[in-house]
């Protein structure tokens, strides 16, 4: 093999080994994201399915890898859930129904106002290729971004715990996605 061909082959081997994200359900989820001043790393990712339909590729981002759901839920540190939608369209009513089902799995009686505010952010259909980010930063709160546009922020660690319990709670409606997000 001549030197030029060897260099070209080595270049493509190195290039193909560089990973910029994890491909789930045809969507590429980045290896890292920013949360405030912090860089979060991909902890795990999977598919949110409803019956037989793939709804979104979901990913959990943390400061460092962790597979203990309770520790993650309770932590007062930056974290994020990214949802990259696969299904052609999900109505805000269906999203809110899913959030409320997740919230109902724990005592949220002291968070009713925050839940109403959170649900009010979801006013349009989530379309295929839309990206929703739910990002928690201590002392700032839980922010909802839709296609990089901030919809609002809700303060408080207790609300953050309730939101992240939707995916990671003991009685989550999404046990397979939970396992995937925990890297299991």
Image: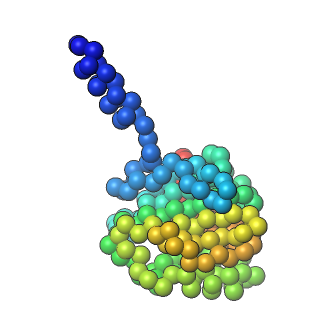
Say left or right for 98 vs 9: right
Q: Position of residue 155 (x, y in %)?
A: 72, 74
Q: Residue at x 48, y 64 (%)?
A: 83
Q: Position of residue 102 (x, y in %)?
A: 58, 73
Q: State whether residue 67 is above or below residue 77.
A: above
Q: Quadrant of residue 71?
A: bottom right
Residue 108, percent from left and from top: 70, 78
Say which of 162 and 34 sits in front: 34
Looking at the picture, does residue 73 appear above or below residue 91? above
Furthest residue to the front? Answer: 4
Q: Residue 47, located in which quarter of the rendered image?
A: bottom left
- Which residue is found at the position 56% from the left and 85% from the top? 120
The image's colour scheme reads: rainbow
The residue drawn where x is 34% and y is 28% is: 11
Q: Quarter-wise, where is residue 3 in the image?
A: top left
In the image, 27 versus 171, the foreground residue is 27
The spot of residue 17 in percent (x, y) is: 40, 34
Closest to the observer, 24 or 32: 32
Question: Considering only vertical position in the picture, is 123 above or below 83?
Answer: below
Count the labels in the image.
0
Residue 119 shows in the view: yes
**Quadrant placement of the N terminus:** top left
Q: Residue 180: tell me if it is visible.
A: no
């Amino acid at each position: 093999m001549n030197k030029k061909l060897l260099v070209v082959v080595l270049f493509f081997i190195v290039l193909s080994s560089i990973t910029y994200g994890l491909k789930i359900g045809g969507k590429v989820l980045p290896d890292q994201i920013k949360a405030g001043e912090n860089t979060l790393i991909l902890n795990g990712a999977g598919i949110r399915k409803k019956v037989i339909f793939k709804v979104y590729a979901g990913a959990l981002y943390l400061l460092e890898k962790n597979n203990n759901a309770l520790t993650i839920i309770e932590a007062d540190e930056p974290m994020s859930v990214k949802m990259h939608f696969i299904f052609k369209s999900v109505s805000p009513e269906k999203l809110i129904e899913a959030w409320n089902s997740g919230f109902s799995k724990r005592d949220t009686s002291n968070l009713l106002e925050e839940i109403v505010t959170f649900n009010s952010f979801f006013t349009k259909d989530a379309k295929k290729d839309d990206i929703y980010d739910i990002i928690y930063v201590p002392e700032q709160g839980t922010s909802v971004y839709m296609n990089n546009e901030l919809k609002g922020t809700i303060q408080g660690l207790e609300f953050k715990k309730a939101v992240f319990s939707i995916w990671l709670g003991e009685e989550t409606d999404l046990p397979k996605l939970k396992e995937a997000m925990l890297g299991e």
